[in-house]
């Protein structure tokens, strides 16, 4: 079950000013050790230590391959790749230098297979989080959110998405 909280757009310059949008409520972030323990509990046939060792090695190898300029696809999860964060465009090709025009690199992950957005939309169920205190940005006060509206399957709302073009607009109207 994916729980969500509502946030109001406070950006006066936005076309979505004062409109309300759902954001996922993340209750926990699992690290590799916790995921390894969870996998062992699913009777994978591997111990927690074996799962942790394999995943730790996998992370190291993925990083190595990405830094070598390769993409890494993990079926039914994501295609990992690197992107470039540009500072400012050069007026001419001859004026372009990595130092002056590239801010850095970033990790990109695109869902693939059974983890694609289309498959998640048909599998996910969402419910408004009950009695969650959400701090309001800037005003020093918060709001107590209650509710129980539940949406499942094709009726689920979709919102933000990431872009491989470096655009930070998530599509939720809160920029």
Image (cartoon, grey):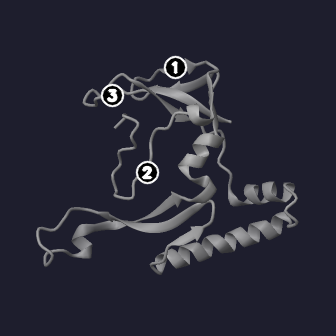
**CA–CA distance between discs 2 and 1?**
28 Å
**Residue shown at 53%/78% (left/top)?**
65
Q: Going by the image, does 2 lie left or right of 36?
A: left
Q: Which residue is mark 3?
A: 16
Q: Nearer the viewer, residue 52 or 66?
A: 66
Category of crowding for the residue at label 1, using alpha-carbon neighbours closer than 10 angstroms: few (below 14), some (14–19), many (at least 20): few
Name above or below for residue 105 compared with residue 167: below
Query: Is disc 2 placed on a helix, strand or loop?
Result: loop
**CA–CA distance between discs 3 and 2?**
19 Å
Q: Going by the image, does 128 lie left or right of 158?
A: right
Residue 41 is situated, as x and y percent measured from the top left of the image, at 86, 54
Category of crowding for the residue at label 2, using alpha-carbon neighbours closer than 10 angstroms: few (below 14), some (14–19), many (at least 20): some
**Residue shown at 85%/67% (left/top)?**
46
Q: Check if mark 3's residue and mark 2's residue have beta carbons within 8 Å.
A: no
Residue 162: assigned label = 2
Q: Check if mark 1's residue and mark 3's residue have beta carbons within 8 Å.
A: no
Q: Nearer the viewer, residue 136 or 75?
A: 75
Q: Can you tell which of label 2 and label 1 is closer to the viewer?
A: 2
Q: Mark 2 or mark 1: which comes first in sequence?
A: 1
Q: Can you tell which of label 1 and label 3 is closer to the viewer?
A: 3
Q: Nearer the viewer, residue 74 or 114?
A: 114
Q: Going by the image, does 117 lie left or right of 76?
A: left
**Residue shown at 62%/36% (left/top)?**
153
Category of crowding for the residue at label 3, using alpha-carbon neighbours closer than 10 angstroms: few (below 14), some (14–19), many (at least 20): some
Query: Is disc 3 placed on a helix, strand or loop?
Result: loop
Which quadrant of the rendered structure holds the C terminus? top left
- The quarter holding residue 35 reads bottom right
Name above or below for residue 38 compared with residue 6: below
Q: Mark 1 or mark 3: which comes first in sequence?
A: 3
Residue 63 is situated, as x and y percent measured from the top left of the image, at 54, 73
Q: Total of numbered circles in the picture?
A: 3
Q: Which residue is mark 1?
A: 143
């Amino acid at each position: 079950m994916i729980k969500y909280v509502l946030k109001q757009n406070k950006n006066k310059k936005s076309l979505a000013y004062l409109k309300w949008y759902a954001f996922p409520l993340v209750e926990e972030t699992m690290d590799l050790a916790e995921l390894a323990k969870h996998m062992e509990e699913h009777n994978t046939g591997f111990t927690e230590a074996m799962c942790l060792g394999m995943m730790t090695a996998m992370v190291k190898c993925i990083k190595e391959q990405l830094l070598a300029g390769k993409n890494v696809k993990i079926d039914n999860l994501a295609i990992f790749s690197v992107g470039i964060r540009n500072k400012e465009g050069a007026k001419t090709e001859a004026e372009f230098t990595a130092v002056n025009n590239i801010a850095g690199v970033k990790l990109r992950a695109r869902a693939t297979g059974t983890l694609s957005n289309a498959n998640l939309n048909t599998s996910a169920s969402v419910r408004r989080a009950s009695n969650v205190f959400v701090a309001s940005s800037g005003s020093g006060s918060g709001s107590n959110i209650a509710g129980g509206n539940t949406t499942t399957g094709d009726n689920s709302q979709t919102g933000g998405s990431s872009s491989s073009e470096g655009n930070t607009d998530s599509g939720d109207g809160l920029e």
